[in-house]
Image (cartoon, coloured by chain):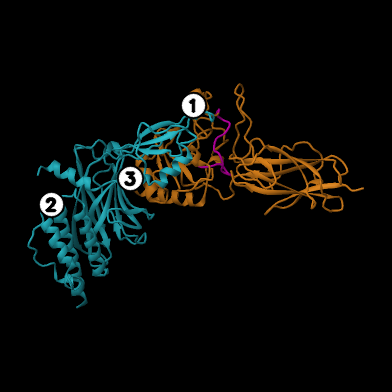
Chain colours: A cyan, B orange
């Protein structure tokens, strides 16, 4: 399969949303009195149409104003996870992301957000050590609980680790950038990565009714493309059953996501392995031999992360002994 | 012979005995007895009493609302040659009213058998000081026509604080920054008020910005007026689409439309980028917008790029 095709398929897995904002069409009424809907989205989900009333109060005609959501990106994300000795917990984990933007995209990627659990701020659970690909990118950990696990379907908000650049310094179509690195005491798990372009700029004549509608219709979901990846997820003392629950859910989402290239045989075997009775107890002894080998990048990352988790549990069990 | 006086009473208000206010001349300054939220109807009562303190029924009362000029940072009554329209003022409706009732800046009615005249005050969306002027005319039970005096109040919000962290650069345009348009708010002391939650989110954002950029200061611009409410009113002519004509030297604003209207409640603050009104500590807009979203401000409907500045706002429901 050509690489470009792979990239397109992967990005299409990260469906932006189940559409909530009505799709714009030319026949939509522009009568101010009868038209209560003020927010529409184009059928390709790339532009927001806001019906404005810039005229005199007696003017009954609404005026549509189109604005880009800067979401015409086709991201491909890979992550290199490694475990290193040191730190209070005896081991910490390094996550280094590479983000590519397909040549078929039209916007630059300038925002990268990885959802993490709602750990307490200041705990140094996640920190950035030189975790910037260049000086034009800023990286930080959110102080507010705003992260959405959209890809895993979980609603509890978490904390983002994020990188952001001005759009002129973003990842242009056809380009990639490495070096987004976070260090953490949290073990790897399936998580959601959200990617976006320049921030939305509303038209000047957008009224409050439109703002409220935009918020209620989850405008934020339209400004980001999300997909599955692996990131800091579990505290060192986490229960193996919780860890396995995350991997089972992630694997299920991966299997359902027709756009992500994956081997049915590998995913099926991994699914069976994680469903085996007693796996939570046996995990510390390692995953064991798998008949099917990973083929695609996310399969390789999945196996590697599980091996790291198993090793961490193994070390923990050894420490107790 | 009975002598009638009136007082105004309302929930949470100190009753004002109008009879104590002599003369009918409009006062240049009034005592602010209460603050009413913009756009939120409030039921009020005037009570007519005689000079013995007894309720006076069937007392004809006329009430009129007047705005007090140059209050709440609205120092823009119009430059020479550009007469401004009068301030919008709160409106009144006799009795217990709803959204479909008829409201007017002047109403009349009779006190009931208990001496009460009940009316509904619908506060304007302008944060400003206003006063009610009451007059009575002779009716059965009343001895004579006489002014009842003025009763002052403010329209706005009482929960805003002044953003005054000395470690952060303040900039509010005119007159602090050369070349900035005069938006008629006097100085930055009037346009940088905000809710505590806004302040907290801004502080968290700036802390992150300092850690990342190395810059310890930012240029804050529009936040809210001391009592909130519509941020700009008469400094610019009302926006009328293609007929809109900005006043030379007064900027090109559309005061009644969002996103500027998000500055009504003290829930939003603008942070300047390079070149905006001479800011010496500019932020990079896209990056700062993202920092705002991750540090307590709202999502894309409330926190966004406005070209030459980042607009960071809490996710709040606006009352108007």
Residue at the disc numbered 3: A19
Q: Which numbered marker is on residue A16?
A: none
Please determine whether, in this image, residue A161 is positioned above or below residue B175: below
- Chain ID at mark 2: A
- Chain ID at mark 1: B
Look at the numbered disc 3 and give the secondary structure of its residue. loop
Residue at the disc numbered 2: A296
**B3 or A161, which lies in front?**
B3
Provide the residue span drawn in magenta.
Answer: B223-237
- Main SS of the magenta segment? loop
Assign the C terminus of chain A to one quadrant of the image: bottom left
Asked whether residue A303 appears in the rendered view, the answer is: yes
Can you give x and y, in whole percent of width and height, for residue A174 in the image?
19, 38
**A316 or B157, which lies in front?**
B157
Can you give x and y, in whole percent of width and height, for residue B309 in the image?
41, 37
Assign the N terminus of chain A to one quadrant of the image: top left
B107 horizontally vs B226: left or right: right
- Count every numbered label the image shows and give the total: 3
Look at the numbered disc 2 and give the secondary structure of its residue. loop
Instruction: Give the residue displayed 27% in from the left and 37% down from the top.
Output: A107
Please determine whether, in this image, residue A13 is positioned above or below residue A152: above
Residue at the disc numbered 1: B241
Residues at marks 3 and 1, CA–CA distance in whole angstroms: 32 Å
Tags 2 and 3 on a common chain: yes
Residues at marks 2 and 1, CA–CA distance in whole angstroms: 56 Å
B61 horizontally vs A2: left or right: right
Please determine whether, in this image, residue A142 is positioned above or below residue A57: below
């Amino acid at each position: 399969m050509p690489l470009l095709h792979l990239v397109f398929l992967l990005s299409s897995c990260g469906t932006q949303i189940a559409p909530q904002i009505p799709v714009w069409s030319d026949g939509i009424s522009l009568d101010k009195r009868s038209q209560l809907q003020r927010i529409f989205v184009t059928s390709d989900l790339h532009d927001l149409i806001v019906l404005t009333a810039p005229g005199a109060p007696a003017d009954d005609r609404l005026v549509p104003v189109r604005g880009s959501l800067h979401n015409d990106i086709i991201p491909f994300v890979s992550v290199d996870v490694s475990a290193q000795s040191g730190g209070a917990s005896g081991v910490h984990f390094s996550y280094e992301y590479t983000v590519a933007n397909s040549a078929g995209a039209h916007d630059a990627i300038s925002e990268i957000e990885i959802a993490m659990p709602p750990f307490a701020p200041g705990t140094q659970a996640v920190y950035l050590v030189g975790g910037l690909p260049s000086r034009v990118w800023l990286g930080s950990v959110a102080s507010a609980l705003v992260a959405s696990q959209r890809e895993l379907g979980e609603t509890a908000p978490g904390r983002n680790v994020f990188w952001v650049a001005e759009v002129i310094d973003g990842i242009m179509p056809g380009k990639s950038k490495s070096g987004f690195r976070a260090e953490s005491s949290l073990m790897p798990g399936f998580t959601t990565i959200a990617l976006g372009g320049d921030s939305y700029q509303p038209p000047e004549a957008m009224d409050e009714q439109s703002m409220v509608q935009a918020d209620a219709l989850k405008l934020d979901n339209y400004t980001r493309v999300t997909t599955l990846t692996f990131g800091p997820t579990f505290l060192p003392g986490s229960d193996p059953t919780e860890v396995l629950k995350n991997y089972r859910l992630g694997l299920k989402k991966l299997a359902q996501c027709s756009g992500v290239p994956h081997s049915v045989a590998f995913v099926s075997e991994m699914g069976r392995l994680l469903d085996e009775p007693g796996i939570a107890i046996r995990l510390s002894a390692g995953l064991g031999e798998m008949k099917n080998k990973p083929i695609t990048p996310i399969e390789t990352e999945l196996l590697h992360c599980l091996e790291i988790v198993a090793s961490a549990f193994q070390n923990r069990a050894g420490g107790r002994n | 012979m009975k002598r009638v006086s009136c007082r105004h009473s309302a929930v949470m208000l100190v009753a004002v005995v109008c009879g104590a206010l002599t003369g009918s001349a409009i006062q240049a300054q009034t005592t602010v007895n209460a603050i009413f939220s913009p756009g939120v109807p409030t039921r009020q009562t005037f009570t007519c009493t005689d000079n013995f303190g007894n309720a006076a029924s069937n007392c004809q009362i006329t009430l009129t609302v007047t705005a007090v000029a140059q209050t709440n940072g609205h120092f823009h009554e119009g430059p020479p040659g550009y007469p401004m329209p009068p301030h919008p003022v709160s409106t009144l409706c006799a009795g217990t009213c709803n959204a479909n009732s008829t409201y007017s800046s002047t109403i009349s009615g009779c006190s009931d058998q208990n001496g009460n005249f009940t009316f509904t005050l619908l506060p304007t969306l302008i944060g400003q000081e206003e006063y009610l002027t009451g007059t009575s005319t002779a009716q059965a039970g009343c001895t004579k026509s006489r002014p009842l005096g003025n009763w002052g109040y403010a329209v706005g919000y009482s929960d805003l604080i002044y953003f005054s962290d000395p470690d952060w650069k303040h900039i509010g345009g005119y007159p602090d920054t050369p070349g900035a348009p005069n938006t008629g708010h006097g100085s930055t002391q009037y346009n940088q008020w905000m809710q505590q939650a806004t302040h907290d989110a801004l502080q968290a954002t700036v802390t992150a910005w300092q850690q990342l950029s190395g810059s310890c200061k930012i240029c804050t611009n529009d936040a809210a007026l001391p009592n909130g409410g519509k941020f700009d009113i008469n400094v610019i002519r009302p926006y009328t689409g293609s007929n809109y004509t900005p006043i030379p030297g007064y900027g090109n604003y559309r005061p009644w439309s969002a996103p500027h209207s998000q500055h009504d409640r003290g829930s939003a603050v603008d942070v300047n980028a390079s070149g905006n009104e001479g800011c010496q500590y500019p932020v990079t807009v896209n990056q700062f917008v993202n920092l705002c979203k991750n540090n307590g401000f709202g999502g894309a409907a409330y926190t966004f790029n406005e070209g030459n500045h980042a607009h960071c706002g809490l996710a709040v429901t606006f009352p108007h």
